[in-house]
Amino acid sequence: MTYNNLEQLFNTIMQLRTISLQTANESHEEKAATMLQFSALNFLKDQSIIAVGELAQFLRLSKSSATQLIERLVTMGLVKRSADKEDRRVIRVTLTSKGDSELILLRKKIMKKMNHFASKIPKKDIEELLRITTNLIETLNKGQS
């Protein structure tokens, strides 16, 4: 791959990221949730109960940044903190029913917005984009290990 192709790929990914963040934030700006908060809630939904360190690792944050994020989510009533039963130094986090409801609402709004844009792109192009981005994510994740 040429330097020009790499630069174009990087710029395209950055533009897509920026547009995605703007679109997602527009979708739920009245709730003042950030994409980072949405990602944390989404991860918690899939994992049920996790340690702060696990969330930090998933979001690629320092533990102190993850703790601050969790504090905001606790204040909003979206997650609950509790000490680990076996090791009280470990803090566990779980989604509250309010957090689950908020996540469902946010997902619906984001999917509606994405559907609006995706409906303008041919299905085969969407499938190809999905194949390529999945491959890219797997390759990047392998490089992180």
Image (spheres, grey):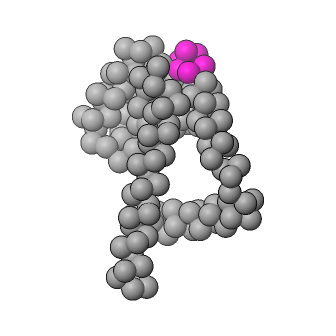
The residue that appears at 57% across and 28% down in the rendered structure is 106
The x, y position of residue 31, in whole percent, is 46, 20
- Residue at 42 percent across and 56 percent down: it is 15
Quadrant position of residue 83: top left
Horizontal and vertical percent position of residue 68? 28, 28
| 88 versus 11 height, above or below | above
Q: Image quadrant for the C terminus?
A: bottom left
Task: Classify 7 as above or below 46.
Answer: below
- Residue pictured at 62% horizontal, 63% vertical: 129
Above or below — where is 113 with respect to 143? above
In this rendering, position of residue 82 left or right of residue 114: left
Give above or below for 110 relative to 74: below
Which residue ends up furthest to the right in the rendered image?
123
137 and 13: which one is in front? 13
Q: Which residues are magenta?
A: 96-102
Viewer can see residue 90? no
Q: Is residue 60 visible?
A: yes
In the picture as drawn, the residue positioned furthest to the bottom comes out as 2
Decide which of 118, 68 is in the foreground and name it: 118
Q: Main secondary structure of the magenta part?
A: helix
Where is residue 112 drawn, in percent x and y?
Answer: 65, 35
Relative side of 102 to 124, left or right: left
